Amino acid sequence: MIRWRGRRGRSLGLRARLLLAFVLLSTLTTAGVAGGIYVQARNDILQRTQDASVRTLTDRLSAVYPLARGTPHRSQLQYIADVVTDQDSATVAMYKDLTSSSSVPREALPRALRQAVAEGDVAWQRVVRHGEPLLIIGTPLRIIHPDGAAWPSGIEVYSIRSLAPEQRSIDQLAATAWAIGGAAVALAIVLALLAARSVLRPARELGHAAQRLGAGDLRTRITVRGSDELSDVARTFNDTAAELERHVERLRALEADARRFAADVSHELRTPLAAMTAVTDVLDEEAVHLPAHTGQAARLVSRETHALSRLVDDLLEISRFDSGAAVLTLDEIDVSALVQATLRARGWTGRVDTDLPPTTARLDPRRVDVVVANLVGNALRHGEPPVSLRLRADAELITVEVRDHGPGVNPSVLPHIFDRFYKADAARTRSDGSGLGLAIARENARLHRSDTHRGDLTATNAPDGGAVFRLLLPRWTDRSDEEES
């Protein structure tokens, strides 16, 4: 199969292919028809001229009969030439080496033509002399006896006629054919454009509809026109879009039910968990006075109860993000002081190298505290010292960077590290966390928005080893985010 390709090996578009095929077909058809008409008309013109010239020559030669027997003289040959000659032709009469006086030399006559005339035939031939087309007609003269018998006289008559008028007619015919062919090709291009437009309009509508569908507009449909193949494609697209909309709506409903269920369960668990946490705190304090096995069991219950309480709190926080109920409580603060307070409250001050220049920004202090605590805590638990924390700011953005010098994050884990319930090591115990910490941290970052920037949290590996987490926040978060999230 032929592949139509443009520059740099790219395939031509459907419009270009339709146009090219249309033009190529019309050009070949026009050239074939025009060429055939031209050749036929040219042959007809030349044949008519040739037949008329032969008849004229024959009619004029009838005036020289009867011929006298014997060897003709030059004067007789000249008489024959004068009788045949007119204003459109020149004539030469020849008998062996004797020739009538003429401007036509013997050498100008084609040898093949002379041979045919010498054999007793009436012959003609078209030649070009000095750029001018000529028709040369040759005929032998016979002596006719009164009883009807005839024998060769040895006299040959050649009439030379210019075909310049006919050539001009042929040239004009060719110019007309070219003009008609050009007009036909131009018309074919116009028709091709119209045809391509009519064919491509449904395809273009289908493409735009597919883009809208891909962008999430599941109510996208195409108007079906006619009953051709393109209309079948449009109907299939509409059926597919409708089925996709039904499936997505069902999945959305199931997802909403699941989120609502998780939120409801988490909310209902908060009260009994609070009571259980208080009880386990008492058990934890009394564990040192209990027998060994009983004390271990008490501490295990306390630890797992606190882990379950944190998981419930995380699920409630996630449900607020999903429902759009999470809001910011903004305040103009010194970010350096906020980060130092985060480290101090968790006893990490001496374990983290800090570079925290004074930086004022409008942020939600509680959410920034949660994000920084999560990043530093992960670096201390899963990385290796030294752990560094650096704060940088410009007129529009602030960046909080947390880095450790451990093995870093597995490259296969990086694309999923902010996914919910994702753990890099499936064998890690429940005490290592719920798998929601980084997901919540990124959502907290993305709540902060300004006219030109939106908060985000990224993870990479340093070239010389260690994981690097960067918290990017707009320096002056919009006040509107306090009501809209």
Image (cartoon, rainbow, N blue to C red):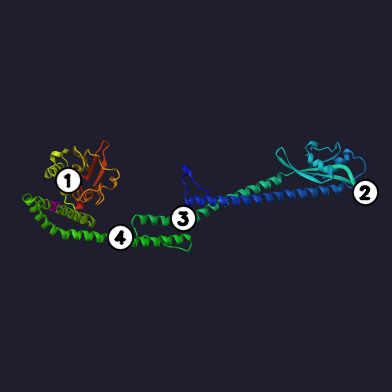
Q: Distance between the residues labelled 4 and 3?
A: 35 Å
Q: Is residue 211 visible?
A: yes
> Overall secondary structure of the magenta stretch?
helix
Q: Which secondary structure, mark 2?
A: loop
> Is disc 2 surrounded by few (<14), some (14 to 19) or many (20+) residues within 10 Å?
few
Q: Was residue 274 drawn as part of the magenta stretch in this picture?
A: no
Query: Could you tell me residue 352's position as x and y percent?
Result: 16, 39
Which residue is located at x 24 percent, y 52 percent? Answer: 421
Between marks 2 and 4 in the image, the one whose residue lies nearer the viewer: 4
Residue type of the residue flagged with mark 1: Ala
**Pointer 3: residues within 10 angstroms few (<14), some, or many (20+)?**
some
Name the residue beneath numbered marker 1.
Answer: 373
Q: State whether residue 91 appears in this view.
A: no
Q: Nearer the viewer, residue 268 or 82?
A: 268
Under tag 3, what secondary structure? helix
Q: Is mark 1 on a helix, strand or loop?
A: helix
Q: Which amino acid does label 3 sit on?
A: Leu
Query: Which SS class for mark 4?
Result: helix
Q: Which is closer to the viewer, label 2 or label 3?
A: 3
Mark drawn on residue 200: 3
Which one is in front in this view, the residue at disc 1 or the one at disc 3? Answer: 1
Which residue occupies the foreground of this view, 287 or 199? 287
* Chain part drawn in magenta: 299-303
- Mark 2, residue position: 145
Mark 2 and mark 4 lie on one chain; the one further toward the N terminus is 2
Q: Spatial distance from mark 2 to mark 3, Cα to Cα? A: 84 Å
Residue marked by disc 4:
251
Residue 416, how many percent across, how many down? 28, 48
Whichever of labels 4 and 3 marks the residue nearer the N terminus, that label is 3
Whichever of callouts 1 and 4 sits on the residue coming sooner in the sequence is 4
